[in-house]
Image (cartoon, rainbow, N blue to C red):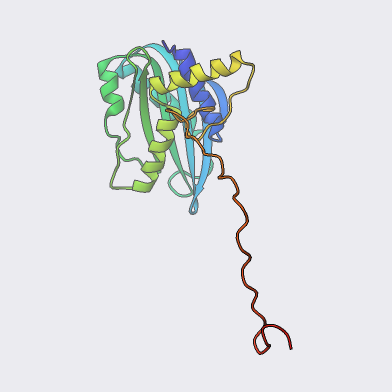
Amino acid sequence: MLTPEQYLQVVAERVVRSGGRLNTVQIGPVTCAVGLFAESIMLSTMNYCVVAGAYSDVDAATLRQFTGMATQHARANVQGTIGWTAASVVICGLVGRVHPDAAQLASAKTSNQFGGETRMVAVDPHAGMTYAFTGGKLWGAAMHGAINAKLTFCFPQPGEALQQVQWQQQQAAYGQPPQSGPGGFPGQIPSGPMPRTSPPPAAGPAGPRPPHYPPPGQPPYGR
């Protein structure tokens, strides 16, 4: 079974692999992996802050309080002026036993904010579920699509995270560093049988040489 600590390792690896700056920050009683991203879009800067921590029992009150403290940390690391030259996107998640009220809170549609967006994530490795809002909005559809992509990549479903952990353990057992696969986690290969390639056909006997045509205006066989 996937442990919360293993899930946090997956989050940290994906933050680094997608170009984020990874730090360890104490937010309340939780030691968190924090990834910071800055992406330029048009004339503004999108500041992403991904925060992930492990907590034994995650209820709605705990998730809401944790999100508030994580948002304060994220706002202190924004490049630019929020709402004018910058937007702040905070994606914060707690990993542990998720209570039903926390699952409902994380899955609820977020409210519009001036110059930013905050997404809550609740991950329950025991139940094999990740709870988060990944729907769309009429306002800023393209931006919310990018936010959803960042959220689902950094906070995968526990089953996908377990596959990544098992693959990395297998690579370590053979003394090989994980290799980046075609999408997904490092070293992932497509499932199913590999396609077979047939050898090239054997060369047959040479055929007749093509006829030679003289340049225009000259007799075909000399003078």
Residue depicted at x 41% and y 37%: 149
Residue 69: image x %, image y %? 43, 24
Quadrant of the image containing the N terminus: top left
Q: Is residue 20 above or below residue 2?
A: below
Q: Is residue 30 visible?
A: no
Residue 100: image x %, image y %? 25, 17
Residue depicted at x 46% and y 30%: 190
Q: Nearer the viewer, residue 209 or 178?
A: 209
Q: Is residue 219 visible?
A: yes
Residue 57: image x %, image y %? 35, 11
Q: Is residue 48 above or below residue 6?
A: below
Residue depicted at x 53% and y 34%: 18
Q: Nearer the viewer, residue 97 or 165?
A: 165
Total numbered labels placed on residues in the image: 0
Residue 95: image x %, image y %? 40, 17
Quadrant of the image containing the C terminus: bottom right
Q: Nearer the viewer, residue 73 or 138?
A: 138
Question: Does residue 37 appear to the left or right of 70 in the view shown?
Answer: right
Residue depicted at x 35% and y 40%: 113
The picture quadrant where one finds residue 222 is bottom right
